[in-house]
Amino acid sequence: MERMWAPEGPLDVGGILGPHQHGGGDPTFRRTPDAAVWRTSRTPLGPGTLRITAGGGTVRGQAWGPGAEWLLDTLPALLGADDDPAGFVLHHPLLKEVVRRHRVPRIGRSGRVMEALVPAVLEQKVVGQEAWRAWRWLLRRYGEAAPGPAPEGMRVVPEAAVWRRIPAWDWHRSGAEAVRARTIATAAWHAEKLESAKDSAEADRLLRALPGIGVWTSAEVRQRAFGDPDAVSVGDFHLAKIVGYALTGEKTDDAGMMRLLEPYEGHRHRATIVIGLSGLRPPARGPRNSVRDYRAF
């Protein structure tokens, strides 16, 4: 199936879809040399593969599999059509300069909670490479082959029932320890309720009622599944330091970050995206966190 869509104004397809990619070898996401972005999803109608290209002010979506129609119906939302940045008022010279160069970033929404939740849990309190390694292993072992002419190796995330019955030894083989495995399995038991949340606020309440899911994980999920422009990843290892350094020249903690972001309430996540586009980072001091490997334990 195919759909042509003309967005209002220029659209950075790669930038909008980037948050849905978890590491360079993500089996659910691929960028190909022809400037296409491929993405798989387990939709309410079943698995599907989506290929997106843009040019001449038009976005072309092609989709395969039982979920093809759903993927094309929600293509504009995935690319930020429902996002309203009108209330995003720039108060800081840095943000004004970044927006002048890059435009106000739009935030898309996938509408799929579990697809955002599993990698977010895997990324809890570990370096990215460790989490992405586990995500790749689990998708290759338990994911479904992507429908259609998808690039080799692409997979669709498993159904909730599959996440619930992954044995402990396979979690260990993936490199995810028991705490994160238990959090994902528990969430999978409540997948139907999570997927039916009517908005980001309800999703936040449902997510944080589950053991092992706190403010950071909930925000990471709602940014992607609901396109929430105000869901700040409080508790992130790097974010508060980056925001503080970019806006004041000094690193800060989560409380300090939230004070700095107060003028952008309603768009605080969007403000952190703009700050990230500035490229400003505090000077690195000391060794980086090492990549652990639970498979050797």
Image (tube, rainbow, N blue to C red):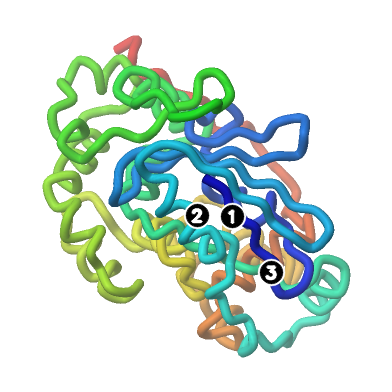
Q: Which mark is residue 224?
A: none
**Mark 3 element type:** loop
Judged from the image, the secondary structure of the residue bearing numbered disc 1 is strand
Image coordinates of residue 232 in percent, x first then y, are: 48, 68
Question: What residue type is disc 3 on?
Answer: Pro
* Disc 2 element: helix
Residues at circles 3 and 1 in contact by the CB criterion of under 8 Å: no
From mark 3 to mark 2, how far is it between C-alphas?
14 Å
The quadrant of the image that shows the C terminus is top left
Q: Which residue is mark 3?
A: 7
In the image, 163: left or right of 5? Answer: left
> Residue at label 2?
72
Q: Above or below — where is 34 with respect to 251? A: above
* Pick the front one: 115 or 251: 115
Q: Residues within 10 Å of mark 1 (few under 14, many from 20)?
A: some
Residue type, mark 2 in image: Leu
Pointer 1: what residue? 3
Residue sitting farthest toward the top? 296
